[in-house]
Amino acid sequence: MSHTSRSQNFLWMSLALLPLIGISFLLAIPPQDYWWVLRVGQDTIQSGAIPTTDLISLSQFGQPIVYQTWLSGVIFYLVYQLGGTTLTFLLRGILIGAAYGIVWGMAREASNARLATVLVITMGLASGNNWAMRSQLFAYPLFALALWSLFKWQNDLTTKTQRREVAKDSSWLGVFAPFVFQQSYLWILPLVALLWANLHGSFILPIILAGIALIFGKGERKPLAITLVIMLLATLVNPRGFGAWRYLVFMLNSPSDQLFAAEWAAPRNQGWQMNIFFAWMILFAPLASLSPRKLSAFEWILFLAFGWLALTGLRYVIWFLFIVAILTSGLLYESLKALTQRLKDAKSQRFFFESLSLRGFAAEKQPKQNFSAINIAFGILMLSASLIFLRGIREKWMGDSIPIYEMSTSPVAATKWLDEHPELEGALFSDYAFGGYFSFNLQSRRPWMDSRFNAFPPEQWTEYAQVSRAENWQAMFDREKINLLALSTASQPKLIQAVENSKAWCERYRDQYAVIFARCNK
């Protein structure tokens, strides 16, 4: 690829990433899977060890717990300490930009810059509901890197003879001869596995990708088999060793997550993002059957395996969209190229061809006039332009119109009020999302439970749901010696009304999002 074509690719990639990074800067921070991770990072740094017992909640305090996301917590905490929410939002933008930039590059290899840009923007908009500030963000560029490495392996055209010739000229290569040329990209996979096993509990995904490639791929299997073994060993390089795999099994079978966490539920065709997801899934098979380009067995298994995963849980949709965007790029490009050729050959339809402007999406060559420096400059300018949406900068021209936090679940003002009234003693019951926010921002009080679904048994979640609906609430508060309530106006209106009607409780604070009650004799 020439320098000029690389500069044009950079320009088109910047155009694709501009809206995605900008959106990542604008999305508010939900409390569920961010603040408790931040707390784990804080406790790890301050104590010099990863917490092994629950230090956050009241009901499970001191009980054994596993934090597989410890490294994410450490990074989040250090970033927050260094630059607050501004640097935290910037970190999310970098992770999103890296992940979708890699996907764009893979789509570009299979098609052209214009088509790759359209597909990545579409895929980014559809998957934006998976961009919450949480440890899974770190896994997105790692997943994209694993895909890139395996597609390089899949499409490696280097022959065994060529590798043997290089090995003869370089005696030091020895057993590493199979990794010469494009096979050298396989070294990325063990690094991905090592990092992922310490960042997020879904570290089995690159193992699955490599396993599918080993069985159904058409690259040389020996180096990939060796790589897969090294990947498995790399996942053991974590503070718990093989315990990481026991945690994975626990998570996949956790009834609390399966029954109560929305992200584990199967996706429904509700909202425009899910409309795109389901439409893409439905239209992919007809596109694959009609396209001149035929998918390999490896690509079909990727589509089917991750498509099935996506249909079983919302948390898996983004992985599927990464894969389907890459596969669609090659299929659609070849289809459009064949269509434009037919339209060119049909003189009577030439006007139709011109009006469709399909040539840009099916073009194989870049425009003849190239301006490398200008392309790079404009690309950098577009990427930099996304910073106008960053926290700390956007307020200068947008004011406070866009909140930093998800306000209905982040009781910012109520937390400050509680912190200023230490005289209100006793056990605290709160909305579970409020508990997630309290875990870092109100460490002087332990909520009865918080947003770590697998930290609490399903029976406790069932009782929490019943109490939030104002069922048997007083008996539960008496049993648990609850003296203080921080309730959500959005998710607990029935409980608020029931407590208001009780003579045993007195309202101490109220705002748009939260109501605080204390026992009247306290």
Image (tube, rainbow, N blue to C red):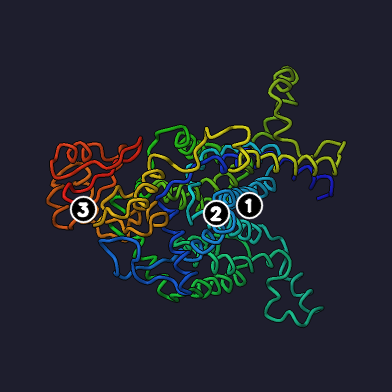
Type of amino acid at the residue the image marks with label 3: Asn
In the foreground, 420 or 332:
420
Give residue 428's quadrant in the image: bottom left
Give residue 377's quadrant in the image: top right
Indicate which disc, 3 or 2, sits on the residue closer to the N terminus. Answer: 2
In the foreground, 371 or 134:
134
- Callout 3: SS: strand
Does the image show residue 212? no
Type of amino acid at the residue the image marks with label 1: Ala
**Mark 2 lies on residue:** 140
Please tell me which residue is depicted at 47% across the width and 64% down the height of the picture: 42
**Mark 3 lies on residue:** 483
Q: How far apart are marks 3 and 1 (CA)?
A: 48 Å
- Callout 2: SS: helix
- Callouts 3 and 2 close, C-beta under 8 Å: no
Residue 443 picture location, percent across and down: 38, 59
Q: How far apart are marks 1 and 2 (CA)?
A: 8 Å
Type of amino acid at the residue the image marks with label 2: Tyr
Q: Distance between the residues labelled 3 and 2?
A: 43 Å
**Mark 1 lies on residue:** 98
Residue 115 picture location, percent across and down: 67, 37
Please tell me which residue is depicted at 18% across the width and 58% down the height of the picture: 480
Which mark lies nearer to you, 3 or 1? 3
Q: How crowded is mark 3: few (under 14 residues within 10 Å), some or many (20 or more)?
A: many
Q: How crowded is mark 2: few (under 14 residues within 10 Å), some or many (20 or more)?
A: many
Indicate which disc, 1 or 2, sits on the residue closer to the N terminus. Answer: 1
Q: In this view, does 522 lie above or below 23?
A: below
